[in-house]
Image (tube, grey):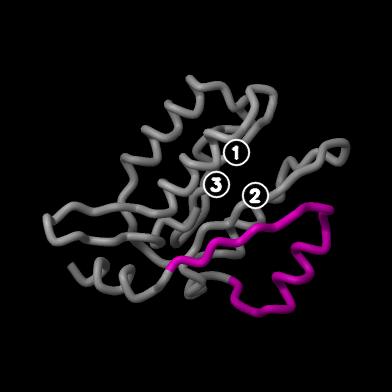
Amino acid sequence: MDLRTGCVRFDAGQVRHPGRQGCNAQWGKMRTNDRFRIILFNNSSRELTGGYVNATPEQIRYYSDQLANFQPGGGTNLYAGLSDGLNSIDADRTSAIVLVTDGVVNVGETAQNAFIKLLGKKDVRLFTFIMATAPTARCSRR
């Protein structure tokens, strides 16, 4: 999840993060024997979950609360986020990466060929959710 993505300020002064809201909605559809990892990236990348965790209601609630503590900011090192997301993919399980980003790659590797080469190393489904950049730009100036 791109930490720059999805910052939308409403008139009441509240900040919402549609990326987090989308993750919460998808987690509700997971079975308890499903697993997930959360990779956060902005100027760099780091794993929030410390490896795969089972999608139990308790784990989902815990990591949803953890995500609520992060504020959008920094750049977008998409390559680092994808690279970390591809680490530890199990060859014997069907895996997918859900990428939530504003799509503005401005830190680290930016060449399209590098991304194609990186993604070609693993057999994984990639689902991308691109959030509008205009709300992000307005929030980042505040």
- Choose between 138 and 23: the one closer to the eye: 23
| Residue 8: x %, y % from top left | 28, 61
Q: Amino acid at mark 2?
A: Gly
- Choose between 68 and 11: the one closer to the eye: 11
Q: Could you tell me which secondary element the residue under label 3 belongs to? A: strand
CB-based contact (under 8 Å), mark 2 and mark 1: yes
Give the CA separation, mark 3 to mark 1.
7 Å
Q: Could you tell me which secondary element the residue under label 2 belongs to? A: helix
Q: Amino acid at mark 3?
A: Ile
Q: Residues within 10 Å of mark 1 (few under 14, many from 20)?
A: some
Q: Is residue 130 magenta?
A: yes
| Residue 21: x %, y % from top left | 41, 46
Image disc number at residue 85? 2
Q: Residues within 10 Å of mark 2 (few under 14, many from 20)?
A: many
CB-based contact (under 8 Å), mark 3 and mark 1: yes
- In the picture of the structure, the residue carrying the numbered disc 3 is 39
**Residue occupying the point 61% across, 64% down:** 79
Which badge, 3 or 2, is on the more N-terminal residue?
3
| Residue 40: x %, y % from top left | 49, 49
Q: Which residues are magenta?
A: 109-131
- Choose between 75 and 19: the one closer to the eye: 19
CB-based contact (under 8 Å), mark 3 and mark 2: yes
- In the picture of the structure, the residue carrying the numbered disc 1 is 37
The answer to whether 106 appears left or right of 51 in the picture is left
- Choose between 109 and 35: the one closer to the eye: 35
